[in-house]
Image (cartoon, grey):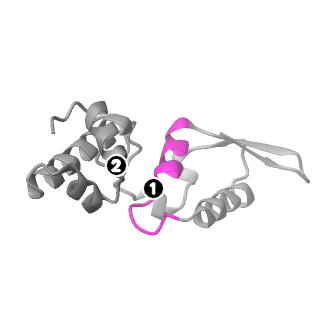
Amino acid sequence: MEIVRTRSALHLVLALSAAQRVVAGPAVGWETSDKLQNEMKRIAVSVRKRAVNESDLSDAIRSSSRGCSPRGPGLTRPLKDEATALETRLIEEALGACDRNQMQAARRLGLSRQGMIKKMKRYEIRP
């Protein structure tokens, strides 16, 4: 990841460990892009060398216990698989609560009957 300071033509390069910390951010309050942008501006202004290491990051980021996970927070499978498992579970629960009545289950889930049938076929759920 590079930051370019246009007026002075300074190029900063983030070391991999620093980039992972910046991307992961602290566990609380790092949800907005403004905070990330401010951190990157702070680095560009305060660091006087070309390579930015983890030690150059703010205390909030360095002391963060949350590292950069290749799967993301709490994910043990790829997102597509997690979404499929969730949809399947919700459809099964709705069908069970509605005595396997597809129309009632679809309404409960906010789907059309046809949408429900398509999902049931896709996920191989029996009526």
Residue 27: say if magenta: yes
Horizontal and vertical percent position of residue 35:
58, 65
The residue positioned farthest toward the bottom in the image shown:
29
88 left or right of 6 in image: left
Residue neighbourhood size for the residue with mark 2, other residues' Cα within 10 Å, grouped as few (<14), some (14–19), many (≥20): few
Horizontal and vertical percent position of residue 12:
72, 43
Residue neighbourhood size for the residue with mark 1, other residues' Cα within 10 Å, grouped as few (<14), some (14–19), many (≥20): some
Q: Nearer the viewer, residue 54 or 108?
A: 108
57 left or right of 107 in image: right
The residue carrying mark 1 is 62
Residue 49: say if magenta: no
Residue 28, picture quadrant: bottom left
The residue carrying mark 2 is 73
For discs 1 and 2, the disc positioned in front in the rendered view: 2
Residue at the spot x=46%, y=51% of the render?
A: 24
Residue 57, picture quadrant: bottom right
Horizontal and vertical percent position of residue 73:
34, 49
Q: Which residues are magenta?
A: 16-31
Question: Which structural element holds mark 1?
Answer: helix
Question: Which structural element holds mark 2?
Answer: loop
Quadrant (top left/top right/bottom left/bottom right) for the N terminus = top right
32 left or right of 127 in image: right
Q: Is residue 126 above or below residue 59?
A: above
Q: Is residue 69 above or below residue 65?
A: above
| CB atoms of marks 1 and 2 within 8 Å | no
Q: Is residue 15 above or below residue 22?
A: above
Instruction: Tell me the kind of residue under disc 1.
Output: Arg
Q: Nearer the viewer, residue 50 or 38?
A: 38
Q: Nearer the viewer, residue 3 or 54?
A: 3
Which mark is first along the chain, 2 or 1? 1
